[in-house]
Amino acid sequence: MQASQLINLSLFTEVLSKAKDSPRKRANHNFHSLPEVYQRFLNVLTKDTYVQPHKHSDPPKPETFLILEGKLGFFIFDNDGNITEKYILSSAGPSFGIDIQPDVWHSIVCLTDSCICFEGKSGPYDPSSDKNFAKWAPSEGSPEAISYLKKLKNNLDFS
């Protein structure tokens, strides 16, 4: 593993290209190895990607999102799927990121053609237990996901 890695426009372009080619319409670039205790990565989203609401509870993990480029909507839900908090996070501000506690239902929606986030959370990463997906929200790739994503975006009207 390299001693350092620059987070620069070249890396943004590389990961954005992968996100555009991905059926999920997003891609990660990990700066960590999976067993590390501090997970840090770029999460690059493109318009219309759907991130099923989830929480990190087994084991409990806090999570931090910082927006490096673009804009996204960030949602926090109660246990029944009701939106309890909503924010617009943007590289232009005034809110650049968010830090959430473990065991908090959350999701994000990309509000620009692409959005590049830096994320940090506790590790190690275990794909079998990293996320608990909300049963009250549609699964990724399901026909209902598109309408749910639209509903979330419509909830961002702060006027």
Image (cartoon, rainbow, N blue to C red):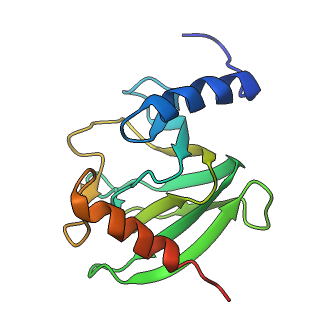
Q: Nearer the viewer, residue 45 or 144?
A: 144
- Count of marks, rendered view: 0
Q: Residue at x 33, y 58 (%)?
A: 52
Q: Determine whether 48 is above or below 21 in the image.
A: below
87 displayed left or right of 151: right
Residue 48 visible at all: yes
Q: Estimate the x, y position of residue 44 in percent, counting from the top left.
A: 55, 40
Q: Residue at x 28, y 36 (%)?
A: 126
Q: Estimate the x, y position of residue 143 in percent, counting from the top left.
A: 23, 59
59 displayed left or right of 28: left
Residue 53 visible at all: no
Dividing the picture into quarters, in which one does residue 156 lie? bottom right
Q: Estimate the x, y position of residue 129 in percent, counting from the top left.
A: 23, 45
50 displayed left or right of 40: left
Q: Residue at x 41, y 32 (%)?
A: 22
Q: Estimate the x, y position of residue 82 in percent, counting from the top left.
A: 36, 83
Q: Nearer the viewer, residue 59 or 90?
A: 90
Q: Nearer the viewer, residue 42 or 55?
A: 42
Looking at the rendered image, the quarter that the C terminus falls into is: bottom right
Q: Determine whether 127 is above or below 117 in the image.
A: above
Looking at the rendered image, the quarter that the N terminus falls into is: top right
24 displayed left or right of 156: left
